[in-house]
Amino acid sequence: LLSLLQKWALLALSACSSLCCLCCLLGLLVAVGLTLGNQGRVLLAPCSIANIALAPVSRECPFDPTRVYVSPPWVGD
């Protein structure tokens, strides 16, 4: 009886996990589709031209697209 209960519990958890994975995948596809659809303009919308000098340190700008990210030399060791 316990083995049968474990199998049903495993099946239910697996189905729930698969459903959550499918929802995440659909959300990711929608996000990528919207970003490609508007060519990424919405990502830079909070960064106004007036505060372009402060954009990298401003909380209103989500990221600095002009920054080159370099790993410190000790990271690759």
Image (cartoon, rainbow, N blue to C red):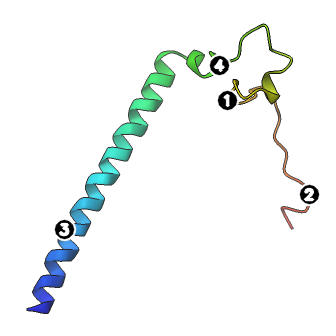
- For mark 4, give the secondary structure: helix
| Spot occupied by residue 41 in the image (x, y as percentages of width and height) | 59, 15
Q: Residue at the far right: name it.
A: 73
Q: Which callout, 3 or 2, points to the residue nearer the camera? A: 3
Quadrant housing the N terminus? bottom left
Q: What residue type is labelled 1?
A: Pro
**What is the spatial separation of the Cα atoms under label 4 and label 1, in whole angstroms?**
8 Å
**What is the spatial separation of the Cα atoms under label 4 and label 3, in whole angstroms?**
42 Å
- For mark 3, give the secondary structure: helix
Category of crowding for the residue at label 2, using alpha-carbon neighbours closer than 10 angstroms: few (below 14), some (14–19), many (at least 20): few
Q: Which residue is denoted by mark 4 in the rendering? A: 44
Quadrant for residue 12, please give it: bottom left
* Left or right of 42, for residue 12: left
**What is the spatial separation of the Cα atoms under label 1 and label 3, in whole angstroms?**
39 Å
* Left or right of 73, for residue 21: left
Q: Residue at the far top: name it.
A: 50
Q: Which amino acid does label 4 sit on?
A: Leu
- Residue 73 is marked as 2
For marks 1 and 3 on the same chain, the one whose residue lies earlier in the sequence: 3
Q: Which residue is at a point 26% across and 53% down the rendered structure image?
A: 19
Q: Which residue is at a point 47% across and 31% down the rendered structure image?
A: 32
Q: Which residue is denoted by mark 1 in the rendering? A: 62
| Spot occupied by residue 50 in the image (x, y as percentages of width and height) | 79, 7
**What is the spatial separation of the Cα atoms under label 3 and label 2, in whole angstroms?**
47 Å
For marks 3 and 2 on the same chain, the one whose residue lies earlier in the sequence: 3
Q: What residue type is labelled 3?
A: Ala
Q: Which residue is denoted by mark 3 in the rendering? A: 12
**What is the spatial separation of the Cα atoms under label 1 and label 2, in whole angstroms?**
27 Å
Q: What residue type is labelled 2?
A: Pro
